[in-house]
Amino acid sequence: LSTSPGPLHPPGAAPRFPWNSLPFPDPAPGVLPPQDIRNTVGNIPMEWYQDFPHIGYDLDGKRIYKPIRSKDELDLFLEKMENPEYWRTVQDRLTGADIALSDEQLELVQRLQKGQFGDVNFDPYEPAVDFFSHEVRIHPVTNRPADKRSFIPSLVEKEKVSKLVHAIKMGWIQPRKPKDSTPTFYDLWAREDPKSILGRHKMHVPAPKLPLPGHAESYNPPPEFLLSPEEELAWQQQEPEERRLSFLPRRFGSLRAVPAYPRFIHERFERCLDLYLCPRQRKMRVNVDPEDLIPKLPKPRDLQPFPTTQALIYRGHSSLVRALSVSPSGQWLVSGSDDGTLRFWEVSTARCLRTVPVGSVVTSVAWNPNPSICLVAVAVDERALLLNPALGDRLLTTATDQLLESWEAPEEERVQPVRWVAAGPEEHARGIRLILEHGKPVTQVTWHGKGDYWASVQRGAGGRQVLIHQTSRRWSQDPFRRCHGMVQCVQFHPLRPYFLVASQRSVRVYNLLRQELTKKLQSNCQWISSMAVHPGGDNVICGSYDSKLAWFDLDLSTRPYRLLRHHRRALRSVAFHRRYPLFASGSDDGTVIVCHGMVYNDLLQNALLVPLKVLKGHAPALDLGVLQVVFHPTQPWLFSSGADGTVRLYT
Amino acid sequence: RRLCILKGIYPHEPKHKKKVNKGSTAPRTFYLLKDIKFLLHEPIVNKFREYKVFVRKLRKAYGKSEWGTVERLKDNKPTYKLDHIVKERYPTFIDALRDLDDALSMCFLFSTFPRTGKCHVQTIQLCRRLAVEFQNYVIASRSLRKVFLSIKGIYYQAEVLGQPITWITPYAFAHDHPTDVDYRVMATFTEFYTTLLGFVNFRLYHSLNLLYPPKIDSQAEDELKPAEGKEYAMDSESYLERLSALSASLARSVAPTHEEEVEIDEFPVEGETAEQMDSKKKEQEALEKHKKLFEGLRFFLNREVPREPLAFVIRCFGGQVSWDKSLCIGATYDAADPSITHHIIDRPRVDKQVVGRYYLQPQWVFDSVNAKLCLPVAEYFPGVLLPPHLSPFVTEKEGDYVPPEKLKLLALQRGENPDEESEEEEEEEEEEEDNDKEEEEEEDESEKEEEMKLQKMEEQKTQNTQSNKVLPVKVTAGKVRLEDKQRLEQEQQSEEKRLAIMMMKKREKYLYKKIMFGKKRKIREANKLAEKRKAHDAALKEQKKKNKKARQA
């Protein structure tokens, strides 16, 4: 703009713009036009004059007053409407006066807004005139004469070259030898010291060598090493990592027919990866003779007597035989079955002497262990029966009957957990003497060693699962205030006044005299099915439905001394022999396993457990095998009852 | 990675994985701290850094198109040597020999790579050179023991200073280069292996008083020189080729004494009985004999036969070998040479047979080497169905399956001649079979009769039970049941064992079961193989019979 002041300010036009107020000489210095009011305050913010009536000073130092601004909105509007110059009117900030822009000024503004040059006549695209052109001129561009040094050889260069020449002459500089890339080898191990550090530290594990190829890898293997079509299909369906052979054995008739192995590079590469990526570990190969692992046990032959062969089969029941008991004399056997009958057998002849229908499933029978009493406790459905089988000595049976009848009802009726009912005449004829109505299904009955007390287990919700009955006084009691878990079975201790209660997971030993819990045995089994107490009284075995047999030593610990996993399926019953160091377990897999369980009087010596014989005979039926095992009281004989409706005697 | 490969550092499996891994059992790889510290002090690390800087400079120079700088930089390319690493990893020579398997296999593989792409030409040439040198050493020392033609390649086993060294070479075909293989890893391994193999070769050559780098014997060289002298472009190139032809013996730095038969002195070791000494001596003799297996035989290889492996094997056992002149350099005699004893050929038919030589398939050479004797040639004539090629690396233990061919071979080695016997047996067997059939029929009849009787009796029984009126109790004479005492004893023992197994502890039982499972599987596999073989043989026999009948008809 400063270059083109001329056309913008024609003389006469009011130079009212701020930019031409400062640098330009006045177009007419001599004449001071009356309109020329130039503010002399300089470049300061004009707000500073806000509160004053004037806005600055003119050239003469007089105040320039602000024009009166008394126009309201309406006036402004009217002016906007009426004044044709309104759109080109702007306010001068320095003087506060309104200025209407001239046409030239407007044009300039518009050109600048369009981004054009302010000067109309300025041509940005003038043709360039090249100073240095391809045309050869007769005159030089510059007329400077050449330097003298351009005619004289350089001393510095000469010095450098002579130095190099000297160095070459002296042999200091030699041409670069062509590099020989082939490596040179020499005797690296010329001074090897076998005792030198073992290469590396002790932890070095040398890489195992690749396994050597077998016959199957041959190009012409024996025919048996070729895979049959089925095997080949199986091989192809396996994952590459699972395959025992990494290749398919193939046979080629001659050597010329053998193709290249497509995975050769892969295999080398995998070997490389193994060498530097695979973690190494020294593994001790278990070089054990498997025979050494088998424990050395005394031979079963040396531990005789024990039942070895099946001697007799007692046939007669038409359904599962769940319960079994032998008379204390060992002459009679009673069995209770799902067909609702009790059968009394003579042991030695397998002859059924009596059959007593009881009307429902017999879950448990127990012969009174007292030899002077001939009485059998039977658990039938919701009742427990006391039954006089009337076998053997007649004096004994009558004595038993008399003993039962000698009871006199007490004066005051006691509240009892069960109802004692004397048998009716018809039942009496069948041998039933007393009926205990429990109101809940009874699962087990068991006698105390003396033969007067007996216990029954009833199943059902709520408490009162175990009841202890006294036959002579015909009364029952509920020994526990509350029962822990579901009671599976109970046993009287053979020698001491203890009472063992097996719940699902544990066995509790109660002292009946002191009426307290003495011990709780943890069985490590899921669900105890049966329990037996050693006649010595210090050992207990528990069979469980998860096919384990736990042997407890009461003196040793509350945990099992041994857990025997002999059977393949659930154990249903376990039993101790009263005289011989034998115990047996019957299981759903149809076998009875007889074991030697020697208990020593020496407390320091642990019990010796040796499996003696696996007795088979019962045919599995309804997914059940052997349901009950019982030892003969005097002989090393074993009775077992099974789901096939038979009772078997092993001798 | 390169450092780990070169220094032979590998991850370790910790003893207590949980302890090391801060309680987690997630799979992680662990290196020994000592190993990593060991890497820090390695001088080669600095060389690697220099190389990295060099690469950077070079890239810059390329970017700026400063070709002079590029040239200069390339001239001063930093190099490194792996000698000290080899020495460090293998402090003794025997250690190096023990680890030579992978080095050899890799070098043989790389030497077959094409000269373009995949890796540097120098590496491939070096590998080829080292492999040829090693082969020449094996020939010179006659230390090859076993060869096996597998479907993957050819396995060789040599015994060098008492160490068995096994390597595999691929069949001579172009490789189908896989895309999922990182050649840089293989190249790094090869870099180390070539260094190792070079030093080992040097030492081995010197142990035999051979010149290294190998020179062909001057006497042999004269023979080998092509008559016209214009057939090959460059002498330097053809030298390695002539060397790799494996047909000439190598020059020795010390002239060999001709009588090499040195009686081995006997040093009786304490606690060694005379028998052991004898057996040792016998072994030694057998080894000497094995080394001279092909001595005096002259082989000629037909052009379709893989030349290099066969020439290598034959030369290793003292045979002389030649091939067609146009096939490869180094042929010593012509196909028409009357002194040729064995002509190796792999074609179904021979057009013009020369009298006085055996025409054989190449498998004969390999089988003979493995059998340690020259096998009868009848089974290896051209066009004949070859007997199976067995792996010499398998030594059957007791209970393993032994293929019948192996049994035959063992018998041959013992000096028996099983062929005649077996033929006789076959004939007998055939006769027996006929008899057997008749007998079987008779037996069948008798069995049927018995069954009928039994059925009748059962029917009677059932009728009796149904009627249940009259109990036809009969007393029949009882039979004496013979009790096999031995069997009873066995049964008792097995029962005792079963009972004892029941009493085993859980962990021991697990281990026991595992061991027994492995054993049983082994037996099962052996039985399966035997069964397969039996079925196959039976099928063959039937086929034969049919053919015979057809011929008769």
Image: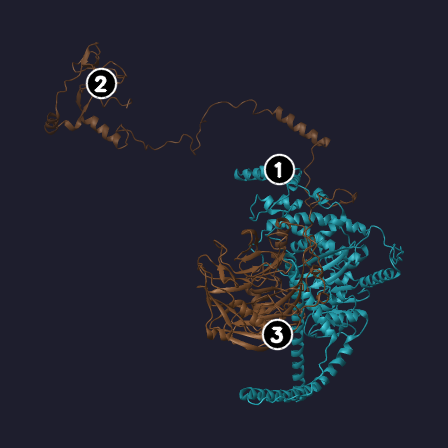
Q: Residues within 10 Å of mark 2 (few under 14, many from 20)?
A: many
Front in this rendered view, residue B191 or B267: B267
**Quadrant housing residue A85:** top left
**Quadrant housing residue B33:** top right
Quadrant including the C terminus of chain A: bottom right
In percent of the image, x 67 and y 27: which residue is there?
Answer: A163
Q: Is residue B78 visible?
A: no
In percent of the image, x 22 and y 18: which residue is there?
Answer: A94
Label 3 resides on the chain identified as A
Label 1 resides on the chain identified as B
Q: Which mark is residue B50?
A: 1
Q: Is residue B347 above or below residue A482?
A: below
Q: Which mark is residue A94?
A: 2
Q: Which mark is residue A123?
A: none
Observer-side mark, 3 or 1, equals 3
Front in this rendered view, residue B15 or B197: B15
Q: Earlier in the sequence, mark 2 or mark 3?
A: 2
A460 with respect to A583 (left or right): left
* Disc 3 residue type (three-letter): Val
Q: CA distance from mark 3 to mark 1?
A: 101 Å
Label 2 resides on the chain identified as A
Quadrant including the N terminus of chain A: top left
Q: In the structure shown, which secondary structural element does the residue marked by tag 2 occupy?
A: loop
Q: Which mark is residue A347?
A: 3
Q: In the structure shown, which secondary structural element does the residue marked by tag 1 occupy?
A: helix
Observer-side mark, 2 or 3, equals 3
* Disc 1 residue type (three-letter): Glu
